[in-house]
Image (cartoon, rainbow, N blue to C red):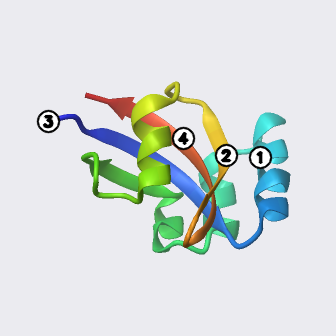
Amino acid sequence: MAKACARHILVKTREEAEKLKQQLNKGADFATLAKKHSTCPSAKKGGDLGEFAPGQMVKAFDQVVFKKPLLTVHGPIKTQFGFHLIETIYRT
């Protein structure tokens, strides 16, 4: 069974996600931004979601984690929770 490890930053608006992505592109620390801005409980862990299998996250999230390049920040990705910036650490 495939598994992946990812971290994310969840915010309410596309604009906020775009601003954070610009900061990341300029070298800002992902975990620091997640702790400061993310509305997900994972913010306490720098956005780390740990390891999970396909189907454990919403479909739009899975599409990024299991199909897009590793160690690249993708997004903003819209789900019913808000807008995500997602980085997949590894896949097995």
Q: Would you say the residues marked 4 and 1 are in contact, meaning their CB atoms lie under 8 Å apart? A: no
Q: Earlier in the sequence, mark 4 or mark 2?
A: 2
Which image quarter is the C terminus in?
Answer: top left
Q: Disc 1 vs disc 2: which is toward the camera? A: 2
| Mark 3, secondary structure of its residue | loop
Residues at circles 3 and 4 in contact by the CB criterion of under 8 Å: no
Quick one: label 4 or label 1, which is nearer the N terminus? 1
The residue wearing badge 1 is: 21
Residue 58, x across and y down, in percent: 41, 59
| Residue type highlighted by circle 2 | Gly
User: Looking at the picture, which amino acid does disc 4 mark?
Assistant: Glu
Residue ID at (68%, 45%) = 29
Q: Which residue is mark 3?
A: 1
Please report contact status of discs 1 and 2: CB closer than 8 Å, yes or no. Answer: yes
Q: Which residue is mark 4?
A: 87
User: Tag 2: Cα neighbours inside 10 Å, few (<14), some, or many (≥20)?
Assistant: some
Tag 4's secondary structure? strand
**What amino acid type is highlighted by mark number 3?**
Met
State the CA–CA distance, disc 1 to disc 2: 8 Å
Residue at x 50% of width, y 69% of height: 44
Name the front one of labels 3 and 1: 3
Element on which disc 1 rests: helix
